[in-house]
Amino acid sequence: MGVLIQILFWISTGMLIPVIILLLAAFMWALLLLGDLYGVYAARLKRSQDLERLIRDVTTTRINYITLEEYIKNSSKLGKHIYQLRDCNWHPVHGEKILADFDLLSLKEVEGATSLMRLGPMLGLMGTLIPMGPALVGLAAGDIASMALNMQVAFSTTVIGIFIGAVGFLVQLVKRRWLNSDHANLRYLYDLSQEEMTHEKNS
């Protein structure tokens, strides 16, 4: 029994360095996600007036293809999918496929943030628990310096893990809201085009 416990202790202690490396890599990834979020926010802010004008035009009149063309030129993800819808002449089957592709792309965009949101606290918890064993051993042996060092590692990994999870949650929350808004606008333009096509056929 003592041998098995010792093996478990060695295995868990040996995982500390990989966990710390993964935590540092996840921390850098979280910083990159924050930078990307700011870049997307700046781009959306720049295009927000064009999108508002586009939605206002199609709300008050029919689809204004001049305004639509101007918005597509901004080469946003929403604009590219609008272009695909227009390029297939708003065909119902192709249109549904394009909308489904947009949803899949949206899921892919938030996968990284969702992974960080879950992975960060898990790695932080591992980084907290692993040094606790050596810290207790140091306490039992009267080695206060060793115990203090292990406790420092434990608390540091906890803080970094929580920070990573918080960044993942924030980025996922904001991006999901943006993508839901884009999907609603895309669906609105598609449904409106279908109504216009039906009206033209009946007239």
Image: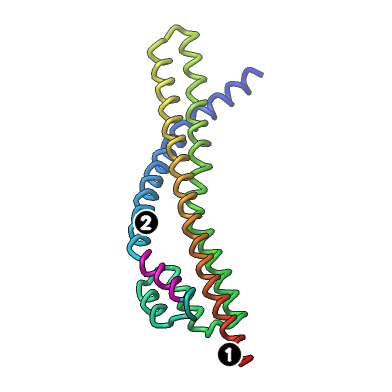
Residue 71 or residue 142, whichever sits in front: 71
Residue in the picture at 51% in, 59% down: 108
Give the vertical position of 81 relative to 38 (above or below).
below
- The spot of residue 110 in percent (x, y) is 49, 54
Give the vertical position of 72 relative to 146 (above or below).
below
Q: Quadrant of the N terminus?
A: top right
Q: Specify the label residue 41 is tagged with.
A: 2
Asked which secondary structure carries label 1, the reply is: helix
Residue 23 or residue 45, whichever sits in front: 45
Residue 117 on the magenta segment: no
Q: Specify the label residue 200 is tagged with.
A: 1
| Cα separation between marks 1 and 2 | 39 Å
Asked which secondary structure carries label 2, the reply is: helix
Furthest residue toward right:
1
- The spot of residue 114 in percent (x, y) is 51, 48
Question: Magenta residues?
Answer: 48-57
Furthest residue toward front:
60
Which quadrant of the figure has residue 154?
Answer: top left
